[in-house]
Amino acid sequence: MARPSLRLIGALRDTAARLEHADTVYRWSHFAHCNCGHLAQTITQLSPPVIYRAAMREVGDWGEQARTVGRTLALGPPDYADRPALDEGAWQPPDVDHCPVANRSMDRIFGELFAWGLEPADMGALERLSDSAVRRRLGTNTVDYAHGERRNVIAYLRAWADLLEEQLGRDARASEHDATSEAAYGDTSLPLAAE
């Protein structure tokens, strides 16, 4: 699950609040107006047409694109050491992998989402509302929980935000406990035995 942070929790809650408005377009089958598309709008502040155009240049749904881009981002650029790349100097069209409207690629969009603490698996789970911890919190089973219904998406986003908030609180309490213990007991390492 995502790394908890106040800004990610806020983005989840803001997305849920925006989806509550009847004038907000929601369409599960549209890259920019679906579950992931709405969260991407909140985090990146990009317009739906820009997100849609970038997503349509890639293969697969949000989950598949996140996995593909996640692997690419994790690997980083290829390291050719001191030898030239095999295709060095080869001509490439100037707009490869970039949205012609805003010069945005899905790599950059996912880069922003991942920088906020999301992971590729989170995008696939949000797309299908399928994260088991969030579903347990909602008290839903895996059957009859439509992932393309606005009210379910709103409930899922709020439950996910609640889980991250609880985890953030636990992490903060653990950090406080560790700091208190170290302050109270000092360095508890034992000296090495004399030889």
Image (cartoon, rainbow, N blue to C red):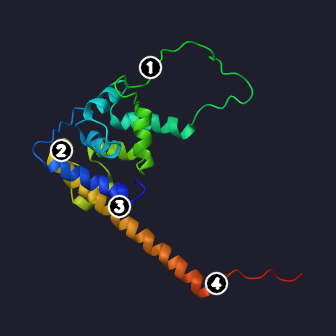
The amino acid type found where label 1 is placed reads Asp
Q: Can residue 144 be seen by looking at this rendering?
A: no
Q: Which dot marks residue 186? A: 4
State the CA–CA distance, disc 4 to disc 3.
32 Å
Q: Which residue is mark 3?
A: 164
Quarter of the view holding residue 8: bottom left
At a point 48% along the width and 14% down the height, the residue shown is 93
Q: Nearer the viewer, residue 129 or 87?
A: 87
Q: Nearer the viewer, mark 2 or mark 4?
A: 4
Name which of mark 1 and mark 3 comes first in the sequence. Answer: 1
Name which of mark 4 and mark 1 comes first in the sequence. Answer: 1
Q: Nearer the viewer, mark 4 or mark 1?
A: 1
Residue furthest to the front in view is: 102
State the CA–CA distance, disc 1 to disc 2.
38 Å
Dividing the image into 4 quarters, which one contains the N terminus? bottom left
Q: Nearer the viewer, mark 2 or mark 3?
A: 3
The amino acid type found where label 2 is placed reads Ala
Dividing the image into 4 quarters, which one contains the C terminus? bottom right
- In percent of width and height, residue 188 lies at 66, 82
Q: Which residue is mark 2?
A: 146
Q: Which residue is mark 1?
A: 95
- Residue 185 horizontal side relative to residue 37, left or right: right
The amino acid type found where label 4 is placed reads Gly
Quarter of the view holding residue 90: top right
Q: Which dot marks residue 118? A: none
State the CA–CA distance, disc 1 to disc 3.
38 Å
At a point 26% along the width and 42% down the height, the residue shown is 38
State the CA–CA distance, disc 4 to disc 1.
58 Å
State the CA–CA distance, disc 2 to disc 3.
23 Å
At a point 41% along the width and 30% down the height, the residue shown is 105
Q: Are marks 4 and 1 in contact (CB under 8 Å)?
A: no
